[in-house]
Image (cartoon, helix red, strand yellow):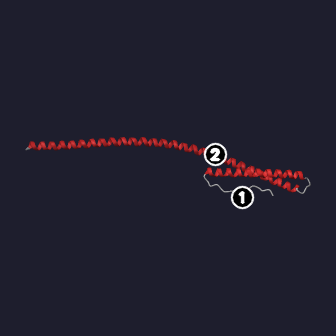
Amino acid sequence: NLLEDTVRLHQKLEERHLALEAGLNWKDAQLETLARETSEVWMRLSQDVATACREREEWRRQALRLEEENCLLRDALLERQVQDQESRRLINELRQEVLTQAHQPNRLETEEMRNTLQQLSLELKEAHQKHVLLEEKLLLSSGTEAKVGPTDEDEAPLELS
């Protein structure tokens, strides 16, 4: 009887031992799978971080390039504004001169001044159109809405009267 009890106890212990070994093998396999998956995730994550760093640098370079383009457009716009103002001043001076000489008998000079005035007026209109285009390009590249047409009467091209 004691021998049978000992054999049964030994069998139960052996079964438990086998079950524990099977559980340990299963846990080892799970740990190995988790370690492999973690390693893959870390590898993908480090690749994603490297890609993000490269993209960040590309965005920085692009932002600098756009800023430089905006500066060039702004400078060109300011230059056009100065040219527009100078052309307006010349047209006004010529208009005054034509008006004062209109009462004088020298018709050849008056005709020549009118032709010059018309030429300058045409140049002013063209300069104004270029100015508006540059301004719209600058506004579009800076992300703001472009305004439609001149907002001030002084900005509109002068008309010959």
Q: Residue furthest right?
A: 105
Q: Earlier in the sequence, mark 2 or mark 1?
A: 2
* Amino acid of disc 2: Glu
Picture quadrant where residue 27 is located? top left
Q: Position of residue 115 (x, y in %)?
A: 83, 51
Does residue 70 appear to the left or right of 34 in the view shown?
right
User: Is the C-beta separation of discs 2 and 1 under 8 Å?
Assistant: no
Give coordinates of residue 103: x percent, y percent.
90, 57
Give the Cα separation between the discs numbered 2 and 1.
27 Å
Which residue lies at the image location 83% right of the left edge and 55% below the top edge?
95
Q: Quadrant of residue 149?
A: bottom right
Residue 84 position within the rendered picture, expressed as x and y whole percent measured from the top left: 75, 51
Quadrant of the rendering where the N terminus is positioned:
top left
Q: Residues within 10 Å of mark 1 (few under 14, many from 20)?
A: few
Question: On the image, numbered disc 1 is attached to which residue?
Answer: 152
Query: Regarding mark 1 in the picture, which secondary structure is present there?
Result: loop
Does residue 56 lie above or below 93 as drawn?
A: above
Q: Secondary structure at mark 2?
A: helix
Question: Which residue is under mark 2?
Answer: 69
Nearest the camera: 105 or 70?
105
Please name the residue shown 61% across and 46% down the image: 66
Question: Mark 1: which amino acid?
Answer: Asp
| Residue depicted at x 24% and y 42% | 22
